[in-house]
Image (spheres, rainbow, N blue to C red):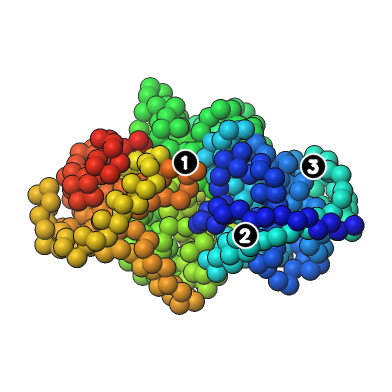
């Protein structure tokens, strides 16, 4: 029996580029989750009798929300719901299931790389039928509906045992609990040369993969240890935990410092990698080297043809605007298109669907291809392993050879986390007002060539996205980008991206922070960072 429950709207349910993210205690408010899910359903049409995918990264509160979402899907008229066993489904695996099973869409429960636990973060986002994040017109419709919603629909039904594979029914709707790993593994076997990678491990190649007590543990154990023959124990922290073992599941040099120390220490592994809370980001290291996400995108694009799934080459490359221009030089040499988009994977969806690009990447450790419509941490690791299996060279040698051929983009990101939101907004406002006065100005010994607030014109659907980040270009090719991030739940995060191109291979051994020191000084002066943030140094440097 369908129940109509009266409710009142909440004022803070506007989904951002990564869905709705708040603290668990916010989501736990009466009717909060139900309001948002019903707002999603009310903003869609044509889903009667269709399939909905539901799953998440196993963080705290996922199980509660999944049960409620199943009941609401039944009440709203879906014909079938697919749920990963135990509610587990990595974000790229969810995208794959939506595409493979011709689902109408999917509800993904995750706050990505943010901490988990009763006092930490939770998130919900809706993915459309192509497997990708909902575009802006859909998220705007959800936001508008959430401001006026006065009821939600559900059915009176008990919770399901999500650990048991098979089919059951809820309110007349079929519910299938499926293996969240199986379909994803089959897709990876189609894309990569598993025999060559098995031979690599058999040769004595050593690797460490940290699943960070998050969702990729089951995927990595099945693929790396069981299918590819990596020794047992290659996968660290492989059991998903609701609080991620009290760790921060963000694969960067702060929260995965032990991997960096391992590859820089005595007797290092040949390769080290990690993925984040929901499995869509990656960290890549080799003996003696950290591979920046921007360099990784360029290297994967230049070498993708070594993997069976990309043997015929790639159609084009897309990168988020803050990502370094290293991939641009690869695209130029290959004679393919290069596209610069705003931050947010949904902006890649149109380009992928139109066949204009094959590989996409963001500087925030997200890389993926047209195999799904999300970034994919395990995919990136496997493509690296395929390249290493074919080239039989160390990671460091491959990276340095790339720099010799294409030049090096010294690149770093300085994050100022937890900044007062009002003051962070004032920083960006004053920066935008000063843009017209910057060209020709000398700052920290450099001359500003141009400055703008990035506006994206989608070449496929003609949509326009404004105010996507301030860009400051200097004579000689250096660049600073400043933007506020929407991935946190407390205060604002100011991200400052600094990039210097160096074609001279004799300079490639220079320390990155030394190479961009003048850009750091220029950014602090132009944006008045210390004044507005109250910080004399960034929280995190990557």
Which comes before the other along the chain, label 3 or label 2?
2
Which residue is at the front of the view, 159 or 328? Answer: 159
Which residue is at the front of the view, 403 or 365? Answer: 365
Residue at x-position 31% and y-position 48%: 496
* Mark whose residue sits in front, 3 or 1: 1
| Relative height, residue 512 to residue 127 (above, below) | above
Instruction: Describe residue 52's horizontal placement relative to residue 10 as left or right.
Output: right
| Quarter of the figure with residue 258 | top left
Which comes before the other along the chain, label 3 or label 1?
3
Disc 3/disc 1 C-alpha distance (Å) = 32 Å
Where disc 1 sits, the SS reads loop
Residue 95 x, y percent position in the rendering: 63, 57
* Quadrant of image for the N terminus: bottom right
Instruction: Describe residue 193's horizontal placement relative to residue 418 as left or right.
Output: right
| Quarter of the figure with residue 266 | top left
Residue at x-position 52% and y-position 40%: 114
Residue at which label 3 appears: 162
Category of crowding for the residue at label 3, using alpha-carbon neighbours closer than 10 angstroms: few (below 14), some (14–19), many (at least 20): some
| Relative height, residue 199 to residue 33 (above, below) | above
Where disc 3 sits, the SS reads loop
Which residue is at the front of the view, 286 or 465? Answer: 465
Residue 488 x, y percent position in the rendering: 47, 44
Residue at x-position 56% and y-position 27%: 246
Residue 146's label in the rendered image is: 2
Disc 2/disc 1 C-alpha distance (Å) = 22 Å
Disc 3/disc 2 C-alpha distance (Å) = 29 Å
Residue 436 x, y percent position in the rendering: 19, 65
Residue 490's label in the rendered image is: 1
* Mark whose residue sits in front, 3 or 2: 2
Q: Are marks 3 and 2 in contact (CB under 8 Å)?
A: no
Q: Is residue 134 visible?
A: no
Residue 478 x, y percent position in the rendering: 21, 54
């Amino acid at each position: 029996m369908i129940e109509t429950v009266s409710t009142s709207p909440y004022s803070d349910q506007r989904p951002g580029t990564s869905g709705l993210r708040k603290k668990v205690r916010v989501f736990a408010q009466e009717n909060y989750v139900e309001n948002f899910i019903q707002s999603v359903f009310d903003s869609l049409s044509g889903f009667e009798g269709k399939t909905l995918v539901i799953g998440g990264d196993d963080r705290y509160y996922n199980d509660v929300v999944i049960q409620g979402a199943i009941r609401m899907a039944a009440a709203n008229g879906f014909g079938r719901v697919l749920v990963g066993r135990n509610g587990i489904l990595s974000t790229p695996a969810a995208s794959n299931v939506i595409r493979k099973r011709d689902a109408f869409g999917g509800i993904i429960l995750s706050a990505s790389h943010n901490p988990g636990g009763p006092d930490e973060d939770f998130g919900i986002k809706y993915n459309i039928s192509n497997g990708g994040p909902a575009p802006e017109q859909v998220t705007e419709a959800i936001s508008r509906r959430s401001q006026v919603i006065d009821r939600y629909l559900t059915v009176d039904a008990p919770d399901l045992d999500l650990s048991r594979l098979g089919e059951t029914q809820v309110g007349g709707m079929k519910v299938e609990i499926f293996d969240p790993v199986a379909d994803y593994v089959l897709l990876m076997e189609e894309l990569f040369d598993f025999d060559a990678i098995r031979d690599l491990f058999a040769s004595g190649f050593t690797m460490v993969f940290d699943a960070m007590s998050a969702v990729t543990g089951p995927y990595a154990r099945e693929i790396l240890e069981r299918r590819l023959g990596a020794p047992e124990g290659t996968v660290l922290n492989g059991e998903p935990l609701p609080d991620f073992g009290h760790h921060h599941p963000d694969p960067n040099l702060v929260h995965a410092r032990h991997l960096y120390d391992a590859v820089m220490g005595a007797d290092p592994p040949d390769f080290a990698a990690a993925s984040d809370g929901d499995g869509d980001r990656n960290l890549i290291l080799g003996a003696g080297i950290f591979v920046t996400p921007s360099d990784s995108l360029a290297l994967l694009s230049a070498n993708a043809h070594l993997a069976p799934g990309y043997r015929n080459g790639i159609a084009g490359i897309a990168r988020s605007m803050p990502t370094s221009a290293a991939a641009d030089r690869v695209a130029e040499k290959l004679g393919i298109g290069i596209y610069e988009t705003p931050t947010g994977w949904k902006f890649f969806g149109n380009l992928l669907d139109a066949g204009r690009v094959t590989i996409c990447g963001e500087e925030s450790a997200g890389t993926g291809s047209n195999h799904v419509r999300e970034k994919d941490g395990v995919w990136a690791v496997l493509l690296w392993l395929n390249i290493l299996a074919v080239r039989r060279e160390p990671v460091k040698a491959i990276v340095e050879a790339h720099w010799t051929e294409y030049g090096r983009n010294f690149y770093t990101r300085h994050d100022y986390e937890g900044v007062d939101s009002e003051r962070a907004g004032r920083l960006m406002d004053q920066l935008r007002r000063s843009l017209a006065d910057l060209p020709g100005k000398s700052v920290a010994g450099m001359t500003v060539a141009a400055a703008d607030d990035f506006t994206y014109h989608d070449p496929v659907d003609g949509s326009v996205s404004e105010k996507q980040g301030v860009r400051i270009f200097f004579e000689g090719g250096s660049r600073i980008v400043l933007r506020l991030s929407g991935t946190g739940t407390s205060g604002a995060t100011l991200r400052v991206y600094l990039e210097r191109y160096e074609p001279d291979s004799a300079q490639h051994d220079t320390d990155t922070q030394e190479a961009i020191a003048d850009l750091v000084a220029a950014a602090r002066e132009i944006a008045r960072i210390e004044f507005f943030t109250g910080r004399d140094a960034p929280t995190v440097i990557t």
